[in-house]
Amino acid sequence: MVEQGLAVVDCGGVGYACHASQNTISAIKVGQQARLYTYLYVREDIFDLYGFADQEELSCFKMLIGISGVGPKAALAILSVAPPSRLALSIITGDEKLLTQAPGIGKKIAQRIVLELRDKMAKEQMENPAAQSAAPTLVQAGKGGGVNHTQEAVAALMVLGYSQAEAFHAMEGLTLDGMEAEDIIRQCLKKLAAQ
């Protein structure tokens, strides 16, 4: 059963109300089996359950609520207007306008999200310099959709919680010629989910 931002999931006769993004709710079919990745948000007297269609959305949710001023409802609002691949790309490109489309997200919070998640990604890149040598190999071999698209895709996958090495490994074997960064991200996410 699906109601205004809630997915009620029947587990052995017990119904669990999960707050969910519009993307997750649209993926659920009433009366059919569904799998949700859940997060239990606990604060003082609050025990709220949040459900997500995939691990990438759950990972984005966790990163968003880790930012000062972004609570779980704001994180869901952001994920409702921007699925994980689009959110990651907007953070890499500094597109805070996409984030402000979410109800309750103003320019200052959007700027903070972009800044903090970009900083986190930059820190991870500096901590793993060995994986940086894989980028030129992919581009020189003609496997990249262009240096910028490949680099944007790697950075976006890192925002989603994957390491740089995992991102480059996911690109191996894919035909990326002429693909936009968002398409590269989708293909890599499919490959990473299958592993």
Image (tube, rainbow, N blue to C red):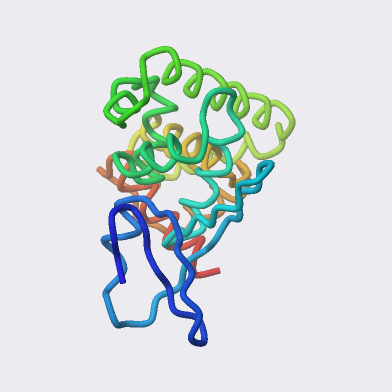
- In the image, residue 61 sits, relative to residue 92, either above or below, namely below
Measuring from the top left, give residue 55's x and y in whole percent. 51, 58
Residue 100 lies, in percent from the top left, at 31, 23
Q: How many marks?
A: 0
Q: Considering the image in quadrants, where does the N terminus appear?
A: bottom left
Q: Is residue 165 left or right of residue 151?
A: right
Q: Image quarter for residue 44? A: top right
Outermost residue toward the front in this view: 45
Quarter the C terminus occupies: bottom right
What residue sits 45% from the left and 18% below the top?
A: 109
Q: Is residue 46 left or right of residue 103?
A: right
For the residue pair 170 and 124, the one nearer the viewer reads as 124
Residue at the image position 34 percent from the left and 22 percent from the top: 95
User: Going by the image, does 192 lie left or right of 148?
Assistant: right
Q: Residue furthest right?
A: 127
Depth check: 187 or 79 in front?
A: 79
Tell me the residue at 45%/60% (across/down). 18
Location of residue 112 with respect to 127 vertically, above or below? above
In the drawing, does residue 35 fall left or right of residue 3? right
Residue at 62% in and 27% down = 120
| Of the pair 96 and 184, the residue shown nearer to us | 96
**Residue furthest out toward the bottom:** 12
Between 8 and 195, the one lying in front of the other is 8
Instruction: Give the x, y percent position of residue 149.
Output: 36, 34
Where does the image place residue 15, in percent across and percent down from the top left? 46, 75
